[in-house]
Image: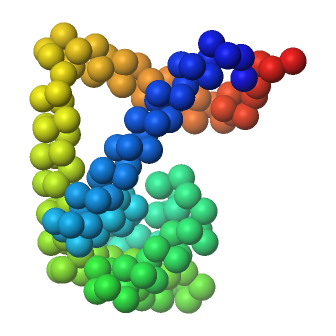
Amino acid sequence: MAKANKQAIDPLLHLTYVLQHLSDTNLSAIAGVGLSQVRLMSVLNDTVTHSQIKIAHDLQQTEANVSRQIRLMKKDGLVSIERNKKDARIRDVKLTGNGARKYKMGVKVLATQQKELLKLLDKKEVKAFERASSNLLAALSIEANTHHHWLLTSDEG
């Protein structure tokens, strides 16, 4: 990667790491769950059961990763797992009452964290951050939908 691009990307990668670490720390201390669990619970946050395949697709993760996370969450009483009535090879996953409570608590923790972080910026910076975030998310959504893997390319010659 060219030096100019590396300088622009390093702060974004560092910020991503710091925010994930901060979120995990706060969630663990207050809600007793981690960021990965909250993300998974966000998919399950309805009264419908979901297959592990659908969860993996929705989270853009491998089925193996989701399966491991679900096993750990089942052990902690956050989800229940049942064989699909139509296809025994499929496992259906659903939040338990405890999982739903932990999810709601986790969402509150993340909302409070976001509010506190944005207090560190002035109004102009917040607006600029919101615009830049929105633009990046829109661009990434378009890239994901077209299966264009620009992250795998390099401008190094």
Front residue of 119 and 50: 119
Left or right placement of residue 2 versus residue 146 in this view: right
Q: Residue at x 12, y 46 (%)?
A: 112
In which image quadrant can residue 9 be found?
top right
Q: Is the residue 24 above or below the residue 13 in the image?
A: below
Residue 47 picture location, percent across and down: 24, 70
From the viewer's perspective, tell me whether residue 75 is left or right of residue 91. left
Query: Image check: 65 left or right of 31?
Result: right
Point 38% across, 49% down: residue = 20
In this picture, residue 102 sits left or right of residue 129:
left
Res 16 → quadrant: top left
Indicate the quadrant where residue 63 lies.
bottom right
Percent x, y of residue 153? 75, 28
Q: Residue at x 33, y 65 (%)?
A: 34
Q: In the image shown, does 104 or 122 lie closer to the viewer?
A: 122
Looking at the image, can residue 142 be seen? no
* Residue at the spot 44% in from the left edge and 24% down from the top edge: 136
Quadrant, the C terminus: top right
Please tell me which residue lies in front, 57 or 10. 10
